[in-house]
Image: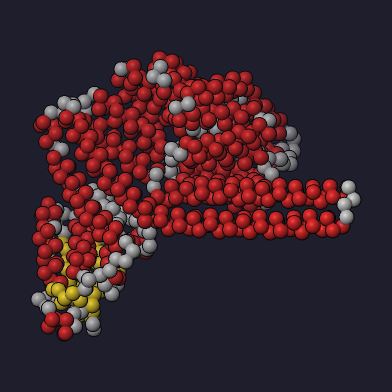
Amino acid sequence: MRLLAISLSGRSKSFCKALYCLAFLLAASPGNAQASKVEELRAEIKKQQDKIDFKVTDTLYIDLLNDLAKEIRFYNADSLLSLSEKALEYSKKADYTRGQSMAYLRQGDYYSDKGERDAAINNFTKALILSRNMEDNALTLRIINNLATEYSYNGDYAKSLNNYLEGVEMAELKGEKEMLSILNENIAALYESQEDHEQALIFYQKAKKLNDEIGNDISSAETMSNLASLYAEMGKLDYAMFNVNRSISIFEKHRVMDWLAYAYETKGKVYLKQNKYQWALYWYKQGELIHQELDDDRGKIHLYNGIAEAYLGQGIDSLSQKYAMEAYDISNQIKFPEGIRDCAYTLYKINKKNGDFEKSLAFHEIFQDITETLHRTENKKSLTLLKTRAEYDQQKQELIEANQKALAKQRGLIYAAIIVLIIFAIITFFIKRAEKIQKRLNAELQAKKEILEEHEAALVDSNDTKTKLFSIIGHDLRGPIGSLQGLLQMFSDGEMTKDEFFQFIPKLKSDVDHIYFTLNNLLSWGNSQMNGATIKPSVFALESLVDDNINLLSELAKSKSIKIVSELSGNTLIWSDSNQIDIVIRNLISNALKFTPDNGMITITAKEKNDLWEVSVRDTGVGMDKVTIEKLFKKNSNITTYGTNNEKGTGLGLSLCKEMVEKNGGTIWVESVLRKGSTFFFTLPKAEDKYSQAS
């Protein structure tokens, strides 16, 4: 899929003064049919400079600089940046707001292509503020689209979707069909990235319908190229080939070279899905020839990765490795998560085939981590809620249309009665009947609306627990189990010797320990979520519980040379559920071990506070900043961080601690200083004398 990031040029007035310093910027030209457009702009710029009364603050001149910057985006990135910087400088001197907004948009495009996300978002945001102040709807829509696209390049689909939806609402209100088509197509790309192909197809078809209404061949061809890529992923290869061939003919006719390169790449992808590697390689190479004239790193990633897969299919592993690594390096250079994921998977397959199991496993873990990042909870939830809302709107619209048809039918009966001059009583009868039907249909509509809203609320509530559960199972359990399964499979298939297998034993033990600890937390948390779950308080000595957990975690502490000290006295009697408090203490000590570097120290103390014991677990670890502390105990927070020795965690332990401490009548909080350590505090009820004696 290829996202549509759009920009726009504007109108202005003229001033005077020659500017020879732009001569270098105007010298480089793209090597395709866009050259005529570029040469036309250069000629107009030269014409303006040759005027006797020329000034660099002439708004027409500024617009021409911005337009030229847009045209050479994929051919000379450095000139794009220089031209936009000049346009911004002159716009500020002329107090020309539109010129400033356009220049920031151009600079955002430059930093986007270089993978400098923060700089790109910063420039798009500046452009957006200025365009909104001017109330320039067309320009505002294009900037919103580019900003949303930038978030999607960063893998933040939730923020991307919010911006696209804002643009859709504005485009519908202002009747901007072209932008509405682009926004729908980019939303389709988000669903495609989440492998929800059916929902992606719905939005691509919306875009296609709008393009047909507009009658723009190039826009239609762009949509057909993306549809072809989607159909290839869905296995509908005949549909894919039909769409890509139509798009290629249009791009070749109009000489739209960047999209033509993508269309050739898509055709290669279709042949790759058919295992016709020679033909796949032929079309990928056609795209590579065009990219020699383009300055478009992002466009090269999937192209080179496709070439790598084609060579791998032919058994030419050396060339496959070369192209896959080049695509992988570009993806990392421009910080493109989807590219890193796809290239890592190709490199995993190449190294596995070549018997380099260590590299193969490393690339497979990168693939899994990036996949989980792109499919994180907030992305899935945002797209699921949009899908639910779209279904609700569709059902609502169907009910409204049914209501309107029924009312139209009744009005027709009334008009017919008037035409044939039926008596007033019959006319009145039909009117009253129509009113009753309308009320009944409105009541049915309202009832169904309420049912849908209740279902949506129930879906959100149930998904909170399910999402957290499946996130932990999918990421923190599936990763280690997947690694174990992969190693066992390679060993059982004879792809790995016994000695090579034994080298991974320490990693497997660490993964199994992590799985065991995670499962204990998961079972305890799941039990706490059950309706009617209750606590069973009793009197017990806290120091015994602490000593048991210190012994339990002593091996882990020893591996990092961490000293665990209990300063609890012999009379720390607690009135709580001992099983739940045992889980709290184990999680806090385990958490401290995770974030304390080698040769550190962990101290457990307890102080009497009226009718409570205040227990603390202090470590000399890495500490936390204020932002992390504020999020730590919030509802639905699921902060997961790697420890000092890359130990994995679920982000579930602290949520479990909070629930269990509060159920037992206590509170929990944390104090921390970055790079000095953290102290987790919690309170529990003291055992009253009568309970102490009874025990």
The residue that appears at 13% across and 32% down in the rendered structure is 500
Left or right: 155, with 224 as reference point: left
Q: Which colouring convention does the figure follow?
A: secondary structure
Q: Position of residue 570 (x, y in %)?
A: 9, 76
Quarter of image, res 548 = bottom left
Q: Is residue 115 visible?
A: no
Front-most of residues 474 and 323: 474
Q: Looking at the image, which residue sits at the far right?
A: 421
Q: Position of residue 351 (x, y in %)?
A: 26, 27
Quarter of image, res 252 = top right
The residue that appears at 16% across and 85% down in the rendered structure is 689
The residue that appears at 33% across and 64% down in the rendered structure is 531
In this view, 526 is above or below 670: above
Left or right: 239, with 588 as reference point: right
Q: Is residue 222 visible?
A: yes
Number of residue marks:
0
